[in-house]
Image: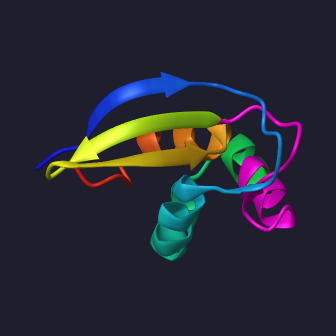
Amino acid sequence: MCVEVLREEQPIARKDHICNSSEILIQSLAYMIHNLTFAEKREIVKARRNNWAIKKGERYNKQVNKMDGEIYDWKSIPAIHKICIDHDLYQC
């Protein structure tokens, strides 16, 4: 079953958060590294320097999603989220 996005917003972080999209990207990075643009690689390096975290004061994507009847929050760095979408890294 696919993910249904119930709500999406772009707040500014009041504290550090884990980037869920980074976890997906890290799993796929080894086989896709040669297909990334220079700008994408630059965003990955920036995220890695921040320990793959959304830092306090940064804008981030926040979604409330539903999958298989379960509702959960998904937080991500916008640039990393875009890379995951552009390279079809999300499951369904």
Q: Quadrant of residue 64?
A: top left
Going by the image, does 70 lie left or right of 24?
A: left
Q: What residue sits 75% from the left and 48% below the top?
A: 43
Magenta part of the protein: which range? 43-60
Instruction: Please determine whether, in this image, residue 74 is positioned above or below residue 13.
Output: below
Q: What residue sits 87% from the left and 45% below the top?
A: 56
Q: Does the segment drawn in magenta span residue 25?
A: no
Q: Depth check: 15 or 20 in front?
A: 15
Going by the image, does 35 lie left or right of 65?
A: right
Instruction: Please determine whether, in this image, residue 29 is positioned above or below residue 42.
Output: below
Q: Does the segment drawn in magenta span residue 45?
A: yes
Q: How many marks?
A: 0
Instruction: Please determine whether, in this image, residue 76 is positioned above or below residue 61.
Output: below
Asked if residue 46 shows in the view, the reply is yes
Q: Depth check: 89 or 36 in front?
A: 89
> Residue 13: x, y in percent?
78, 39
Q: Quadrant of residue 52?
A: bottom right
> Residue 78: x, y in percent?
64, 36
Going by the image, does 56 lie left or right of 18?
A: right
Asked if residue 87 shows in the view, the reply is no
> Residue 65: x, y in percent?
34, 40
Q: What residue sits 56% from the left and 70% below the top?
A: 26
Describe the colour scheme in one phrase: rainbow
